[in-house]
Image (spheres, rainbow, N blue to C red):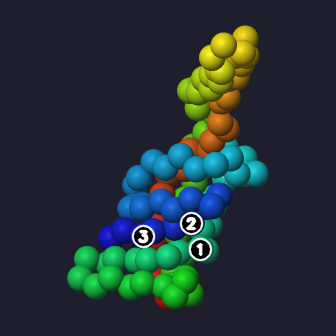
Amino acid sequence: MYAVIRSGGKQYKVAQGDLVRVAKLAAEKGAAVDFDEVLAVHNGEALVLGAPLVLSAKVTGRVVQHGRGRKIVVYRFKRRKAYHRKIGHRQDFTEIRIENISVG
């Protein structure tokens, strides 16, 4: 069984027991998190698609850790203009272990 959820403007395909990194959520480590924006659910025999959401579906998980991703270096350069700029960025994330996928 798997589901497609939406969190932080992105879509994630999750199954029970998966470890998923989503954009940082305001939840403590060890807290339960519910995802109500379920776009699709596959229960092994049938695929249920939402229009746009599956109203009776819910995905629950538990926060494993918060962290920051690896550094992304953005380098801008214009030739012959003596212009160059180096910027680094690290994205915050929340790691979640999916515990349960329930359909109505």
Classify mark 1: residues with Cα within 10 Å, few (<14), some (14-19) or many (20+). Answer: some
The answer to whether the residues at label 3 and label 1 have Cβ atoms under 8 Å apart is no
Three-letter code for the amino acid on which mark 1 is drawn: Glu
Residue at point 72% right, 47% down?
A: 28
Residue at point 42% right, 62% down?
A: 13
Toward the right, the furthest residue is 26
On the image, the x and y values in percent for residue 98 come to 48, 58
On the image, the x and y values in percent for residue 15 come to 38, 62
Three-letter code for the amino acid on which mark 3 is drawn: Ala
Q: Is residue 88 above or below residue 47?
A: above
Residue bearing the label numbered 2:
6
Depth check: give the residue in front, 95 or 50.
50
Q: Is residue 60 visible?
A: no
Q: Is residue 31 visible?
A: yes
Toward the left, the furthest residue is 45
Residue bearing the label numbered 3:
3
- Dot 1 or dot 2: first in sequence order is 2
Q: Is residue 78 above or below residue 102?
A: above
For mark 3, give the secondary structure: strand
Residue at point 59% right, 27% down?
A: 72
Q: CA distance from mark 1 to mark 2?
A: 6 Å
On the image, the x and y values in percent for residue 99 come to 47, 60
The answer to whether the residues at label 1 and label 2 have Cβ atoms under 8 Å apart is yes
Q: Is residue 39 above or below residue 34?
A: below
Q: Is residue 96 above or below residue 103?
A: above
Three-letter code for the amino acid on which mark 2 is drawn: Arg
For mark 1, give the secondary structure: loop
Residue bearing the label numbered 1:
37
Image quarter (top left, top right, bottom left or bottom right) of the N terminus: bottom left
- Dot 3 or dot 1: first in sequence order is 3
Q: In the visual, does 72 lie left or right of 18?
A: right
On the image, the x and y values in percent for residue 21 come to 53, 46
